[in-house]
């Protein structure tokens, strides 16, 4: 390729470049280009988060699952409450007995 | 997005409310149902697995002890008032106040001695293993052998014939 080049070709090239009309770039062209590149490279959390949340909301709204979850929560809460209530009642009964046989003044 | 978020958050809040509601209701119901009337010795029966014969003997001991305990508590109260009166008359600890304090301490010691005697008598009615456990627990709770943590917290003000 280099062998074919000569000063005339260079002149010709310059003339061609000069004759080609270079359109003016729009304002803030470079900034916009970089912004579009960044947008293209950035992850898309909003769209994936949206689908995840939508799926969860759809799951929550399934009647069978909602009913089963509610039943499990009520039963678990009741069991824990019975356990704690029994313990508290037992402690109260013990304290009641101790108050009867060992007045605070004697302890 | 907003709708889904609202649904999920609403479901979470509903779940928490259901769990907490059932927990609180069952706890309160259980406490009310299991609660024993004042003066009942059902706790002893359950805790130390006592039969009817043992319970009858303990109830008799308990009644005798309570009458004596009441009398001793009145004595302690009288001694406390005497100490307070002796201390009110002067800013120093006078010989009279010291004597009253010694009398109060002696009275307290007498009460504690009677209390321990009651615990021993009750423990002897129980099966041996349970009796030993009862005696250790009572001594720990009443004489604070294991520090403040051994004291159960009572919701009530305390002893029926307790004197300040």
Image (cartoon, coloured by chain):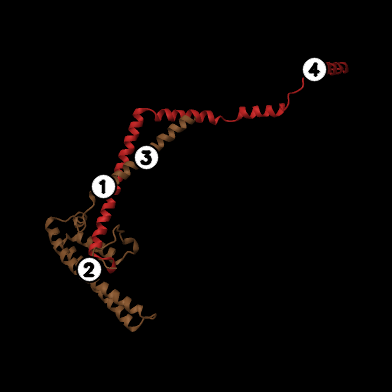
Chain colours: A red, B brown
Report if the CB atoms under discs 2 and 3 are less than 8 Å apart: no
- The residues bearing labels 3 and 4 have C-alpha atoms spaced at a distance of 73 Å
| Residue at the right extreme of this rendering | A7
Q: Name the residue under label 4.
A: A21
**Are both tags, 4 and 1, on one chain?**
no
- The residues bearing labels 4 and 1 have C-alpha atoms spaced at a distance of 91 Å
- Write down the chain letter for disc 3: B
| Residue at the left extreme of this rendering | B53
- The residues bearing labels 2 and 4 have C-alpha atoms spaced at a distance of 114 Å
Secondary structure under the numbered disc 1 in the rendered image: helix
What quarter of the picture does the C terminus of chain B occupy? bottom left
- The residues bearing labels 1 and 2 have C-alpha atoms spaced at a distance of 32 Å
Q: Residues within 10 Å of mark 1 (few under 14, many from 20)?
A: many
- In terms of sequence position, does the residue under pointer 1 or pointer 2 come before the other? 1
Of the residues tagged 1 and 2, which is closer to the observer? 1
Q: Is residue B56 above or below residue A46?
A: below
- In depth, the one of B23 and B149 nearer the eye is B23
> Where's residue A90, x and y in %?
26, 53
Q: Name the residue under label 1.
A: B30
- Write down the chain letter for disc 4: A
Q: Which residue is drawn at 32% across and 38% down?
A: A74
> Which label number is shown at residue B17?
3
Secondary structure under the numbered disc 3 in the rendered image: helix
Secondary structure under the numbered disc 4 in the rendered image: loop
């Amino acid at each position: 390729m280099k062998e074919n080049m000569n000063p005339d070709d260079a002149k010709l090239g310059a003339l061609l470049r000069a004759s080609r009309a270079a359109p003016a770039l729009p304002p803030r062209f470079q900034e916009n280009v970089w912004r579009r590149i960044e947008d293209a490279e950035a992850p898309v959390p909003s769209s994936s988060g949206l689908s995840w949340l939508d799926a969860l909301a759809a799951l929550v709204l399934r009647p069978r699952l909602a009913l089963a979850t509610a039943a499990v929560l009520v039963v678990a809460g009741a069991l824990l409450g019975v356990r704690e209530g029994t313990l508290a009642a037992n402690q109260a009964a013990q304290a009641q007995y101790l108050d009867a046989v060992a007045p605070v003044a004697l302890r | 997005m907003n709708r889904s978020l609202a649904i999920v958050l609403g479901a979470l809040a509903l779940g928490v409310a259901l769990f907490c509601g059932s927990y609180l209701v069952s706890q309160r119901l259980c406490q009310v149902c299991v609660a024993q009337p004042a003066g009942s010795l059902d706790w002893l029966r359950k805790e130390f697995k006592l039969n009817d014969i043992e319970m009858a003997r303990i109830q008799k001991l308990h009644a005798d002890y309570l009458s004596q305990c009441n009398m001793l508590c009145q004595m302690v109260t009288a001694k406390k008032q005497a100490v307070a009166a002796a201390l009110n008359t002067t800013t120093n600890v006078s010989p009279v106040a010291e004597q009253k304090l010694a009398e109060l301490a002696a009275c307290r010691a007498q009460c504690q001695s009677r209390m321990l005697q009651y615990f021993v008598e009750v423990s002897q009615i129980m099966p041996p293993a349970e009796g030993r456990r009862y005696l250790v627990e009572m001594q720990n709770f009443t004489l604070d052998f294991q520090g403040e943590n051994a004291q159960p917290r009572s919701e009530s003000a305390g002893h029926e014939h307790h004197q300040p």
